[in-house]
């Protein structure tokens, strides 16, 4: 998990055994730079939205770089050959950025504004907002590829961007703490409570989004939410914005690989 502190247990005596396998540090360095690029893009986007008086759609941004152990663990689970090239091409969440938004419609707004940038390429998208996991987990997961300019070359780095509302994030952190991917099974009644809490959080998200939308629409002297759709024309694209707040949910469609 992004903020988790990991403790390595080592024998009391002697040095730890040397790690077998490829040197993943160059990959991790590239991923760290990819995180920097996406984080900078989000920061510019937030500034721009504030400037437009449409409000900052993002509450908080955090990031994490997958540890070598975690990369190797995932490679083993997914039967990815343990070579740097295979890992680079098949494990696309070594770089992770999470943006916490205030409202569900902001999740999609941030997505659209980011993808409107010509140097951001969408590799895949999983919409767990419209199609939550059976556990109740909701978030929008994008794998984007961004250019990282390094001395004498450009690397195209994959970054996983998770977009959640404050409520979704609150729920996911609790669920993670209780036992997501944990060793001990979570009791059925706890899972049930979590599922119902996720639905309550979602219902509050939708209601608050609706209230905001209505309040904005009633304010004559303030730009409405829809005005923020003018922004992407600055980047040369106006066709990608969903821009139909408040978000009310979508029919099931599952995972969507990018075109
Ligand atoms: P960390 O440190 O949080 O990143 P994939 O192999 O990519 O197809 P994967 O990696 O499991 O499958 O992708 P998935 O399920 O789309 O998303 C993985 C990440 O989303 C997790 O990262 C969590 O951050 C978050 N996530 C997904 N499902 C849940 C869930 O049910 N509950 C919670 N709390 N978080 C979830 P990791 O791997 O946990 O590590």
Image (spheres, rainbow, N blue to C red):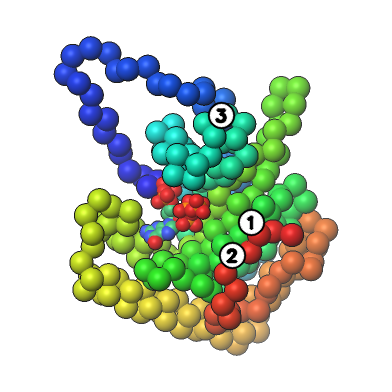
Q: Earlier in the sequence, mark 1 or mark 3?
A: 3
Which residue position holds label 2? 255
The answer to whether mark 1 and mark 2 are in CB contact below 8 A is: yes
Q: Earlier in the sequence, mark 3 or mark 2?
A: 3
Element on which disc 1 rests = strand
Q: Earlier in the sequence, mark 1 or mark 2?
A: 1
Q: Is residue 165 above or below residue 118?
A: below
Q: Is residue 92 above or below residue 161?
A: above
- The answer for how far apart the CA atoms under marks 3 and 2 are is 27 Å
Identify which residue, 146 or 252, lies in the foreground.
252
In percent of width and height, residue 146 lies at 68, 43
- The answer for how far apart the CA atoms under marks 1 and 3 are is 23 Å
Identify the image quadrant of residue 48: bottom right
> Is 41 situated left or right of 6 in this image?
right
Element on which disc 3 rests = loop
Which residue position holds label 3? 83
> Is 231 situated left or right of 157 in this image?
right
Identify the image quadrant of residue 35: top right
- Ligand 1 sits in which quadrant? bottom left
In percent of width and height, residue 177 lies at 27, 55
Identify the image quadrant of residue 124: bottom right
Label 3: few (<14), some (14–19) or many (≥20) C-alpha neighbours in 10 Å: few
Which residue position holds label 1? 124
């Amino acid at each position: 998990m992004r903020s988790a502190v990991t403790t390595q247990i080592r024998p009391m005596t002697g040095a730890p055994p040397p790690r077998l396998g490829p040197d993943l540090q160059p990959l991790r360095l590239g991923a760290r730079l990819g995180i920097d690029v996406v984080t900078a893009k989000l920061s510019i986007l937030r500034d721009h939205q504030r400037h437009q008086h449409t409000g900052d759609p993002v509450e908080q941004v955090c990031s994490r770089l997958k540890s070598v152990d975690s990369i190797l663990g995932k490679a083993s689970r997914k039967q990815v050959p343990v070579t740097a090239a295979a890992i680079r091409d098949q494990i696309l969440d070594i770089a992770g950025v999470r943006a916490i938004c205030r409202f569900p419609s902001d999740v999609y707004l941030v997505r659209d504004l980011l993808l409107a940038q010509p140097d951001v390429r969408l590799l895949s998208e999983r919409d767990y907002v419209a199609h939550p996991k059976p556990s109740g987990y909701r978030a929008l997961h994008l794998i984007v590829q961004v250019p990282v300019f390094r001395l004498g070359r450009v690397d195209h780095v994959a970054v996983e961007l998770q977009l959640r509302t404050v409520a979704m994030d609150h729920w996911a952190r609790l669920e993670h703490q209780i036992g997501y991917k944990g060793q001990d099974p979570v009791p059925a009644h706890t899972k049930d409570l979590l599922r119902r809490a996720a639905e309550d959080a979602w219902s509050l998200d939708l209601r608050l989004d609706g209230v905001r939308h209505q309040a904005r629409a009633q304010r004559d002297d303030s730009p409405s939410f829809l005005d923020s759709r003018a922004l992407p024309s600055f980047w040369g694209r106006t066709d990608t914005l969903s821009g139909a707040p408040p978000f009310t949910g979508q029919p099931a469609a599952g995972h969507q690989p990018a075109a």
